[in-house]
Image (cartoon, grey):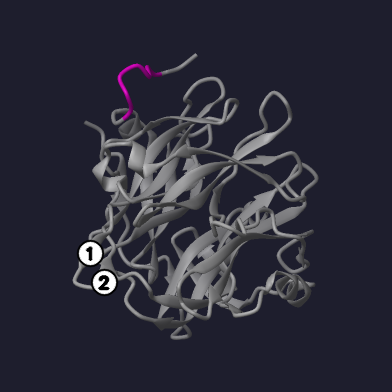
Amino acid sequence: MSKPYLQHNGKAIETGGKFKHVMAIALDPTSDYKEGIVRCITERVGDVEVSGYVDRSEIRKIKGDSLESFSIGERLNFVRADEVIASLSTEGSEFIGFEDPDIFVDESSLVHVYFTLPFLDKSKKHTIVHLGHAVGNDLDSLEMTAPALLADPKTHEGAKEISIAPLNSRGIRLNLFESSKREKDRTYSTVRIAIAENMGKPWKAGEIVFHPKEHQISWIGGHASPGPLLPRSFIDMGENKLLGIMNGREANKKVGDKTKYGMFSVGLFIYDYEKGKIDWVSPEPLIRDTEARTITFASQFVETKPGEGILYAHVDDSFVRAYALYADGLKELLPNHFKFPLK
């Protein structure tokens, strides 16, 4: 059997002692993936293994001489950020910083950055999470716009962590995003459709396409979050389908009066971007970092040569690791009815 991945040694980002925790790397394709951005934790209160912890964050630029080693630079700035954040603030809420960015370059070479906009309710009962957006000619000229997706004001079902899909036959992108769903005494993280007719304008939230409660998959029994979709040039899944990276977490457990999180792992899924349907999710995880206590969470993939690429994931919301992915090994993990090479 061919190996599907290889964990790199060490960390992919050097902090220079500036930050104790960094996560959620996003690389800029216009720089040949040698530059990008990363979420840096400025303050952490609580334990990432236990519900209720709070991170305050900012997004910083990164630069690397190779795809295996990056250094942290200046803070990423958005024109109109204060204005947009003020428009989203409500009485009793506190904005706790920009989180979890993604970069997309459109057909006219404009750079779009999407990111989480979290507002902590001062009663500490919940966090309201919007999906923010900014656009510019490059990372130095970004202007913040209205959010791509807003949290539901009644249910607090939010929007974060996106997978950007190709255009379908109608010229629309059926992107994916992580949301939440309260079910009696438990809240799940679900995967939903985001209907994007224009990547620079607000999207429309669509239906849930993966709900952990409805599937008997233990590694993703509590929380699901879509990661990067792998390009067809890396692994060809056939017409209108792509192989994607899914981040999944085991169901929460009650320990005394606290809620303890399960293990977060990296797995696979097959997405039909024409229909907006997840056809399959791997029954077992693909990657659990050897140093992870509770979290391995993927955010970026870069194809490096035919059949090979680098996946970046953060471990315990603290440091970023690179993993080599091999298409031949991944193919052996897919359902039997997918035969390669596909025509």
- Residue at image coords 29%, 49%: 287
Where is residue 58 drawn, in percent x and y?
57, 76
Furthest residue toward top: 343
- Residue at image coords 22%, 64%: 254
> Which residue corresponds to mark 1?
254
The picture quadrant where one finds residue 37 is: bottom right
Q: Which mark is residue 308?
A: none
Where is residue 15 drawn, in percent x and y?
46, 78
Lateral position of residue 228 relative to residue 60, left or right: left
The reply to whether the C-beta atoms of the residues labelled 1 and 2 are less than 8 Å apart is: yes
Q: Which mark is residue 258?
A: 2
The answer to which of 88 and 28 lies nearer the viewer is 88
Query: Where does the magenta region start and end?
Result: 334-340
- Residue at image coords 60%, 80%: 92
The picture quadrant where one finds residue 84 is: bottom right
The picture quadrant where one finds residue 160 is: bottom right
The amino acid on which the numbered mark 1 sits, given as a three-letter code, is: Lys
Q: In the rendered view, tell whether residue 89 sits above or below residue 302.
A: below
Q: Main secondary structure of the magenta part?
A: loop
Where is residue 39 drawn, in percent x and y?
52, 70
Lateral position of residue 284 relative to residue 229, left or right: left
Lateral position of residue 107 relative to residue 15, left or right: right
Q: In the rendered view, tell whether residue 240 sits above or below residue 22.
A: above
